[in-house]
Image: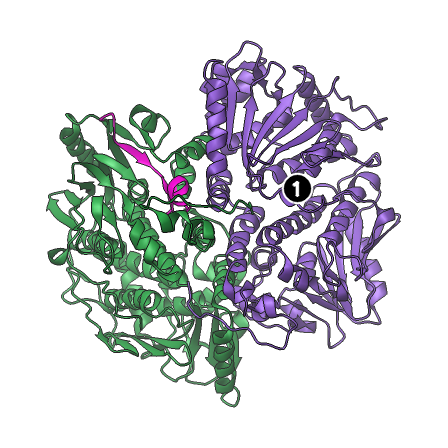
Chain colours: A green, B purple
Amino acid sequence: METRPTRFETHPSRYKHWKLTVDGEIATLVMAVDADHPHKPGYELKLNSYDLAVDIELADAIQRLRFEHPAVKAVVITAEIDRVFCSGANIYMLGQSTHSFKVNFCKFTNETRLYLEDAAEHSGLGSLCACKGTTAGGGYELALACSETMLVDDGNSAVSFPETPLLAVLPGTGGLTRLVDKRKVRRDRADVFCTTAEGVKGKRAKEWGLVDHVVSRSAWDKTVAERAKALAAKQTVTRGPAFELKPLEPKMSDSALTYQYVQLTIDAGERTAQLLVKAPDKADAFDGAPASEPWSLRAFRELDDALLHLRFDFPDIGMIAVRTQGAAGVVAASDEALAKAAESNGFAREVRLLQRRVLKRYDNTARSLYAVADAPDACFEGVLLELALGADRFYALIDDKISVRTSAANAGFMTTASGLSRLAARFYGQPDSVQKVLAAGGEGPIDVEEAEQLGIVTIAADDIDFADELRIAIEERASLSPDALTGMEQSLRFVGPETLETKIFGRLSAWQNWIFTRANSTGEHGALTLYGQPERPQFQWKRT
Amino acid sequence: METRPTRFETHPSRYKHWKLTVDGEIATLVMAVDADHPHKPGYELKLNSYDLAVDIELADAIQRLRFEHPAVKAVVITAEIDRVFCSGANIYMLGQSTHSFKVNFCKFTNETRLYLEDAAEHSGLGSLCACKGTTAGGGYELALACSETMLVDDGNSAVSFPETPLLAVLPGTGGLTRLVDKRKVRRDRADVFCTTAEGVKGKRAKEWGLVDHVVSRSAWDKTVAERAKALAAKQTVTRGPAFELKPLEPKMSDSALTYQYVQLTIDAGERTAQLLVKAPDKADAFDGAPASEPWSLRAFRELDDALLHLRFDFPDIGMIAVRTQGAAGVVAASDEALAKAAESNGFAREVRLLQRRVLKRYDNTARSLYAVADAPDACFEGVLLELALGADRFYALIDDKISVRTSAANAGFMTTASGLSRLAARFYGQPDSVQKVLAAGGEGPIDVEEAEQLGIVTIAADDIDFADELRIAIEERASLSPDALTGMEQSLRFVGPETLETKIFGRLSAWQNWIFTRANSTGEHGALTLYGQPERPQFQWKRT
């Protein structure tokens, strides 16, 4: 493990950087970054600049609004510092971070912003970014992820992307993609905007489509209230009943993270890990307000937390064997109950949406993932079968007691970033193969040999060969270059149509990855390295 | 300029690495790489490995088949070395190349393979890759770009992507994308394939969809002939009349490349260049077999050649001012004549397709492009207006004598890599704005102020401000980090839907760019650096 485990769990009562208040249909989330509480020592979070600690709280707030405050239909994201909304990701933090941390930080913040959009699109929770002052870099990227953006018209406050002109990097949290693909800002104007460090303000910001509204200081509070109310009135999806998200509090040691249903076990010497997800003892029922946390929610919150620990705390662990465990039929029954309840119960729908987001986080985790079914109680069914379909490979032991099973969770709702289901992505361009799997699954468990023939299992072997074959495959994978594997997996996992999401993770992040390694940004004389110092950066001029 | 200008022009009579023969409807292109004639000294091109010199000849051959051999409906790409088709890009060449060269080499080879697909899709020229032996890395990527692929079934010959397991890089010429997106190989099988250095052969290669046919040695020649004939019979597009592509032979100095219609002028001190394209004296007519080379073809072949010189020979020149010159109406008239002729004349259609490819090469050139209309004879009309629409910005002087004009070339045929026209990409999601521009253009020249209002011109200024504004914009652009600009431009230029092409250039190439800079591939102990040496690579294990 890195020097200490990162703590992804938090609660509004412990927030250091945001203030969450709820008033009827409207919530307000005030960014008030405490400069003295950065994620790691070594820099101050001045001017509402943010780091991982700040973004973990934001992610928590969005999640809690969805589950704990179903009456809220619009959230206003704003700040209370004079003349500053947010100055973006903290540059000194970036400058002193490892490449691996920088990339994973950007990935997490990207996911958080996509969750804001997901909540607006699917959960009746619109967002209004009320920028009453400087809105720079990641601050503007946060605004771009909101349903509506207001900028104060005070002759001074601008939205800006100073990354390229000042730091020799890209706006790395979806900004470039959202400018042209989401907001449809004309690309030549986007070019001017992204190379103008001071940004664009006032009427021009509105005319270019960079913000939705420019509003004077005098009309500010009134307009914020009006717009938030109008945004709330537009929502058509109803959430609830309310459900409080209780702490996960895994047991942590140097080699294991143990939750109720999820266990992550690290073999540091081999640079491998096992990720185990257990089925519940009995199927979830979704009738009315939940008395206790259903497995369908708890297990996926745990999985989410485990994936984040894996990304941030175990960067050397490249190869993950994913196993499942449980009695047959229970997960499939939970999935069916959940899918049925989701038709009318907002809480159940939120649970499904959360499962979908967690599975996307899994797809987007830059580690080799081999699903392994090699024990009689392996339980790749329904929503847990998605872990096998999302993995790079699926190894299964040919054994009478081992089978896989489909459920409502495999039929289309659990889309990947491309918008395809995992079955549709696996059988890209061959919808018949998807239908065959679902038809076979509709008749009951699918044994390993049939699953191999249907194309679900990558490698099926009997007990004479299985253990050796798996061991060698894992050893080989763990011996390959982690960089090449990341690039390869990114190219193979996201087959099919591209979306805002796949563009952000596949294209923008790849360019940023490259730019972060270049001397022009992070070298001794690079712009990111020298930020805030009197020395000017020196560039190598070769274009590529 | 780099040590010497690269020579992109060639002719079958001068080929060192390929043999082109034509027999009725079938052409054969035999890869027979001369190990002793690499592009640069320092490595031998053994086992039909290739470098830029080899690929320049391949690109030339495809172009000439389209124009000079219209009767040919299928080209067989094969080799005559015993038990080897092609072993891919030469590793020693890659190992000793600069990052900038590697990236531009991959870009050129990617374009060449896309041209094979373009010829099959639009020009009635199918391709059969007949792999009678080892087909590794770039060799297999060439096969993937062909309409059909045959692999010999001799118990030994395999298709393979050894890049990740042996070299710690990616198959960088579209291989990963074509595997899953074009050939729809199941992604878990693609994962196994891409990490298995020895590749996949025989029945399994066919079953997994890696090749279309596996054929025994004894049935080989007969089957090649049959398949080629069948492929030719499937073609429905007719090319011709034949037209011989005469040499371009620009005048070259250290600071200028001068063609008949195109001039590239370098200011090495400022790291800027001017790319000037001149209109013809009188409009092209397309009536029957062309007596001499029409401007519509010649100017775009020259532009293509100039862009390649810019990429390879002037890597430090980051900022290009693009100007046009000519009498009003002549280009638009040529475009109209060309578009009309293309409905029935195969040669005219080929000219349009070539213009489209060259404009894509322009879009995909990693330099900042500012179109500039600042002289009374500026001629941004029709197909030359595409240069302004494809540029990052368009600066125009407000002057009675300066205008822009649309033609049939702006109406949809000249698609970018995303499949959108440049007008549709500029006004992404706003089809009304496209129609407004075309409607205004239909009424005649559009003056600069109207063009700015319509959204074609980025910055319009009068003669008091124009020169200073442009000078400062160019100086500023030339002062920014070339890496950040490349990533930014790639993100903003390719707005909208993704395609195989945009995935290859935007996603796959971005990952490869990053991977090429990593110590695990190109560092002192990296796998690419140490290839062919007894020492084993040492990897840094952090995943990103």
Q: Position of residue A70 (x, y in %)?
A: 17, 50
Whether residue A159 is visible, yes or no, is: yes
Instruction: Give the magenta-colored segment's residue range.
Output: A154-175
Q: Relative to A451, is A471 above or below?
A: below
**Which is more toward the observer, B4 or B496?**
B4
Quarter occupied by residue B11? top right
Q: Quadrant of the N terminus of chain B?
A: top right
Q: Chain of mark 1?
A: B
Q: Quadrant of the C terminus of chain B?
A: bottom left
Quarter occupied by residue A308? bottom left
Q: Position of residue B312 (x, y in %)?
A: 65, 45
- Amino acid identity at mark 1: Met
Q: Residue at x 16, y 26 (%)?
A: A219
Q: Looking at this rendering, what residue extends furthest in the top direction?
A: B400
Using a 10 Å C-alpha cutoff, classify the residue at mark 1 as few (fewer than 14 neighbours), some (14 to 19) or many (20 or more).
some
Q: Residue at x 33, y 33 (%)?
A: A198
**Which is more toward the observer, A132 or B525?**
B525
Q: Which residue is mark 1?
A: B1
The reply to whether the magenta stretch includes residue B97 is no
Q: Looking at this rendering, what residue extends furthest in the front direction?
A: A535
Q: In the displayed structure, does residue B102 sit left or right of residue B40?
A: left
Q: Position of residue A366 (x, y in %)?
A: 42, 64
Q: In the displayed structure, does residue B244 sit left or right of residue B133?
A: right
Q: Relative to B253, is B486 above or below?
A: below
Q: Position of residue A153 (x, y in %)?
A: 24, 27
**Which is more toward the observer, A157 or B131?**
A157
Q: In the displayed structure, does residue A345 sit left or right of residue B472?
A: left
Q: Relative to A459, is A342 above or below?
A: above
**Which is more toward the observer, B449 or A161?**
A161
SS at mark 1 in the image: loop
